[in-house]
Image (cartoon, rainbow, N blue to C red):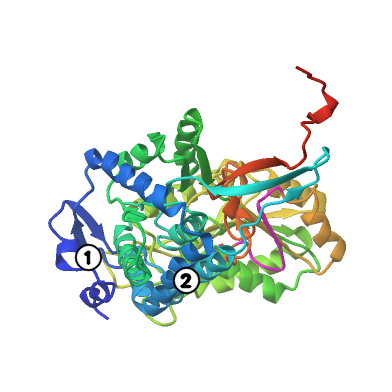
Amino acid sequence: MSHAEILAACGLTAADLSGGTMNVRSPIDGTTLAQLKETPVSDMAAIIARSQAAFKAWRNVPAPRRGELVRLLGEELRASKDALGALVTLEAGKITSEGLGEVQEMIDICDFAVGLSRQIYGLTIASERPGHRMMETWHPMGPVGIISAFNFPVAVWSWNAALALVCGDPVLWKPSEKTPLTALACQKIFDRALARFGDAPEGLSQVVIGGAALGEALVASRDVPIISATGSTRMGSIVGPKVAARFGRSILELGGNNAMIVAPSADLDMAVRAIAFSAVGTAGQRCTSLRRVIVHESIRAELVARLAKVYASLPVGDPRVAGTLVGPLVDNAAVEKMQSALAQAKAQGGRVHGGEVVTQGVPGGAYVRPALVEMPGQTAVVRDETFAPILYVLSYTDLAQAIEIQNDVPQGLSSCIFTLNLREAEAFLSAAGSDCGIANVNIGPSGAEIGGAFGGEKETGGGRESGSDAWKGYMRRQTNTVNYSTALPLAQGVKFDV
Ligand code: UN1
C-alpha cells in the first residue's frame, strides 16, 4: 500500500492532514506524511472543561454498559488492524509484524477491560462493632491525561483508555509529536465505536496535537486528577512533582535499563533468540528493550561468539519488506545519541561490534546496525538508557554478584534470567533478587502480555498500567461503614456519652 492508501484506510482525510505547520515525517525514508494543525494552548481550558462535563455523565453509566463501549472499540480495532498496523509502521518505523502486534495489544486490553467492567470488586471487611458492616467501593476519579511516547504510539493509549473508560473516566490524549497520525487514526476508530454505542457523552476521548505546552496544561490542571505519562526519566522528573504539588495522581512509565542474566546452565539456543528479539527488536526502542547481558564468565566467550554471528547477519532495512528485522530509528537525533553512546563506551574500555550508520538504499531513513559492546564492567554509559539497539555484555562469577550488577542501575523496569537451575531462578525472583517491576525466567525482558501489571521501580517511576489490578490507579477507593443496629457504639471502645 502507498502512503496515501494507508492514510486513507485509517480514515484520515486531506483536511486532517494539511493546513498546519507541524511536519510529520516517516522514519522509513524521511518523506513528509502530513502538515498538521496544532491544538492552540488557549483551547486547553475548554477541552478540559468538556472532559469534566463528560465525566459527570459517564460516571453514572453502569460499568458493564461502559464496558460495551470498549467492546465495540475492540471490534473496530479488529476491523482496522491491518490499516492501523501499517500506519504504525509508516509513522514509527516498526517492522510490519510489530506494527500489527501493537494493534493486537490494543485489542487484547479491550477484551481485558470488557471483562473488568463486570469485576470492579471491592472488599467487605469484618467490623469490630455489632450490627455494623464495612466495605469498600471503587468510584470513577475524573479525566485522565495521557502523555505517550513515539515507540508504542497506540498501545500505551489503549492500556490507559480501555481501563479508564470502564472505570468511568474520560481520557485526554497528548501523543508524541513524532507520532500524531496514529493518534488521529485511533480517534477515528474510537468515534466509530462511539457512533455504534449511541448515548455516550461528548468529549469522552479527546486528542490534542502539538508540543510540550499542551502536556503542561494537562499536568497543571486540577480538573485532570490523573496524569499517565510515558517517556524519559527527565520528563517524569518534571511531571511527577508538578502533579504531586496539586495532589493529583500520576502513573509514570519512564526509563528502563533491562538486563538478562545468563547462567551456566542456560539453554543457550533459547537465550540467543531471546536476546536477539529483545535487544534488536523495535530497533532497541522499547522501554523494555534488553540493554545489558550479564553472562557467567565460563560461557561468556561462547555467548559473545554466537551473538556476534547473529548480529553480523541481521537484516536491517525498510520495515515494510518481508524478512527485515531491524527498521529505522525514529530520527537522526536518535542516531547521533547512539553514536555518542558508542564513543563513550569505547572510551570506557568497551569493544564494539557493529553499530554503524547505514542507508540501506533509503537515504532519508535513520538506519543503524545494532551494536554489541563487550564492557570491562558497569561503567557510566552502561548505567544510562540509550534508546537505540546497543547491547552491553558484562560478566559475573556468582549469582549474588550478577543480581547486584543487575540492580545497580537507576532504572527498575524489566529483567530476566536464563537458567535451568531452580534455586537460581527462585533466588532471582525472591525479595533479595531482581528489584524490577517485571522479572522473568527463560523469557526476555520485552514483549509483556497485557494481563500482567506493567511498570517498574526506581527511576522507572513506580506506575502500573495494563493488567492485574492496575485499574485501581484509575479509581478512588471509598471505605464505607454502615450501622444497621439501634445503638451507636464507637470504635476502639471509646465512651462519649452526651
Ligand atoms: C514501551 O516500550 O513503552 O512489554 C511498552 C513490551 C510491550 C510494551 C512496551 N508489551 O515490550
Where does the C terminus fall, quadrant-wise?
Answer: top right
109 vs 60, nearest the viewer: 60
447 vs 19, nearest the viewer: 19
Q: Secondary structure at mark 2?
A: helix
State the residue position of label 1.
31
**Figure quadrant of residue 326:** bottom left
Q: Is residue 415 left or right of residue 463?
A: right
Packing grade of label 2 (10 A; few <14, some 14-19, many >=20) is many
Q: Amino acid at mark 2?
A: Arg
**Figure quadrant of residue 327:** bottom left
State the residue position of label 2.
71
Q: Say if residue 246 shows up in the picture.
A: yes
Q: Is residue 436 magenta?
A: yes
Residue shown at the point (60%, 50%) measured from the top left = 472
Q: Say if residue 455 shows up in the picture.
A: no
Residue shown at the point (71%, 55%) measured from the top left = 395
Residue range highlighted in magenta: 435-445
Outermost residue on the left side: it is 19
The Cα–Cα distance between marks 2 and 1, rounded to whole angstroms, is 36 Å
Residue shown at the point (50%, 42%) measured from the top left = 233
Q: Is residue 411 above or below residue 398?
A: above
Where does the N terminus fall, quadrant-wise?
Answer: bottom left
Q: Is residue 233 above or below residue 62?
A: above
Outermost residue on the top side: it is 498
Q: Is residue 431 left or right of residue 166?
A: right
Outermost residue on the front side: it is 486
Q: Is residue 470 left or right of residue 425?
A: left
* Main SS, magenta residues: loop
Outermost residue on the right side: it is 423
